[in-house]
């Protein structure tokens, strides 16, 4: 045992010379196989040893940012054994890249050519383990909330807070592109809406539809779900983390001002995948809270009944006049739809306010807080009023009020 420790000590000193295994074996008067065993023990002791023991005879590296590929070839004095060792040797960040092909070839000199081809991860390349690792290390930042008392002389109502199509990371041409300013505007809008409602009513249940393009992009390449490139102010990961923090702050605030919070995932066409991860992470974060509930199924249509009113949700990237019939015949919502006294459908997607009635069903297309980006400007989709809404529902009489908070 003492002899092995002495050999390990001597080998560590020899590593700084960056010589071959044969050289180390001759120096220590042991076989190359014994050197390999000692190196393995050192690697387990220090994961950085892989890079230290490598004698790079030659190397080439090609990065294609447009295609998202990385190719690397090294000539080594030994053959790498697995993806982890390959990634360390070729300096490939496995959080961003996935190794798709690798191969080795023995040269006449006895050295090895090690070649690797890797590509940037796409949404399908991220595993549940990647997401579990993110959740384990993630610590949201939010401030404490002030609880507001209930006033017995005020009517108690249910409220929907609508902040559709926020597009958190979108680069705009008509406003501020500081993400902290944008987050502050979102929080301020929620606070203004709740303050206005609370001035008149007590709040029982708050319904908060999330997604509806809360995020601007859906993947590492800054593309929408269908692959359309977007101009952004922060990258994929920063948008997600900022968005998670923002909604934790908002949900905490809503909880402080109501008896119950219902969070409903309404997936948009920009962030279908990322918004599902967001809803899942929020549900895990609030899993022990008895007054916060989530509907985060992958269905594109959702529904809820508030007193005598049924409300159906869809992002609205469709012919919205067909939605009342969709809910009336839907296997999960037709009974709620039929039993309700009042029926509504709420959508987003178009970034401007509109309301119409189809056979007694009120369809309301919600406004957006989002500014104008280059694409919308080029296509003359401009001058929409940027706003969030609070819709107020009485137990028996349906919607009795609507509050609006606008940003300039």
Image (spheres, grey):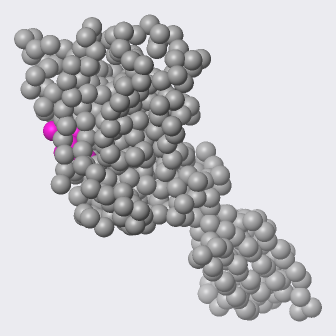
- Residue 159: percent from left, percent from top: 26, 24
Vertical order, 331 against 245 (above or below) = above
Q: What residue is rendered at 66% in x and 76% in y?
A: 70
Q: Tell me which secondary structure the magenta stretch mostly adopts.
A: helix
The quarter of the displayed image where residue 69 is located: bottom right
Image coordinates of residue 14 in percent, x first then y, are: 66, 86
Q: Which residues are magenta?
A: 186-192
Can residue 205 be seen in the rendering of this structure?
A: yes
Specify whether 298 is left or right of 35.
left
Which residue is painted at 89% across and 88% down in the image? Answer: 107
Q: Toward the viewer: 361 or 154?
A: 361
| Residue 371 falls in image quadrant | bottom left
User: Residue 72's spot in the image, x, y percent?
Assistant: 70, 80
Q: Is residue 283 above or below residue 374?
A: above
Where is residue 41 drawn, in percent x and y?
Answer: 70, 66
Please name whichever residue, 64 or 319, is drawn nearer the observer in this view of the structure.
319
Residue at position x 26%, y 27% in the image = 391
Q: Is residue 16 left or right of residue 237?
A: right
Where is the C terminus found, in terms of image quarters? bottom left
- Quadrant where the N terminus lies? bottom right
Q: Residue at x 54, y 60 (%)?
A: 228
């Amino acid at each position: 045992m003492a002899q092995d420790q002495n050999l390990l000590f001597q080998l560590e000193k020899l590593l700084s010379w960056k010589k071959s295994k044969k050289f180390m074996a001759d120096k220590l008067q042991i076989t190359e196989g014994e050197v390999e065993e000692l190196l393995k023990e050192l690697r387990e002791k220090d994961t950085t040893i892989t890079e230290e023991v490598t004698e790079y005879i030659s190397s080439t590296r090609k990065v294609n940012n447009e295609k998202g590929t990385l190719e690397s070839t090294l000539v080594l004095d030994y053959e790498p054994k697995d993806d982890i060792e390959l990634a360390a040797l070729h300096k490939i960040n496995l959080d961003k890249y996935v190794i798709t092909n690798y191969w080795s070839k023995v040269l006449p000199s006895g050295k090895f050519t090690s070649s690797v081809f890797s590509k940037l991860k796409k949404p399908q390349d991220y595993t549940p383990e990647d997401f579990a690792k993110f959740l384990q290390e993630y610590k949201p930042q939010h401030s404490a909330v002030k609880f507001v008392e209930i006033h017995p002389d005020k009517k108690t109502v249910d409220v929907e807070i609508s902040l559709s199509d926020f597009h958190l990371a979108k680069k705009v041409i008509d406003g501020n592109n500081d993400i902290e300013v944008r987050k502050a505007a979102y929080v301020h809008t929620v606070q203004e809406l709740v303050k206005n409602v609370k001035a008149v009513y007590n709040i029982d249940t708050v319904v908060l539809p999330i997604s509806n393009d809360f995020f601007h992009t859906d993947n590492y390449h800054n593309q929408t779900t269908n692959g359309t490139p977007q101009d952004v102010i922060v990258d994929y990961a920063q948008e997600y983390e900022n968005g998670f923090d923002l909604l934790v702050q908002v949900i905490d605030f809503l909880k402080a001002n109501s008896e119950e919070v219902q969070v409903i995932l309404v997936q948009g066409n920009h962030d279908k995948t990322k918004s599902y991860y967001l809803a899942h992470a929020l549900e895990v974060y609030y899993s022990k809270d008895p007054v916060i509930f989530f509907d985060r199924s992958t269905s594109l249509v959702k529904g809820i009944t508030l007193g005598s009113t049924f409300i159906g949700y869809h992002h609205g990237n469709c012919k919205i006049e067909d939605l009342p019939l969709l809910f009336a015949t839907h296997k999960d919502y037709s009974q709620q739809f039929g039993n309700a006294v009042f029926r509504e459908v709420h959508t987003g997607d178009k970034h401007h306010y509109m309301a119409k009635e189809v056979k007694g069903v009120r369809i309301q297309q919600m406004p957006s807080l989002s500014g104008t980006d280059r694409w919308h400007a080029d296509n003359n989709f401009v001058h929409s009023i940027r706003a969030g809404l609070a819709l107020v529902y009485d137990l028996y009489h349906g919607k009795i009020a609507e509050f609006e908070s606008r940003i300039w």
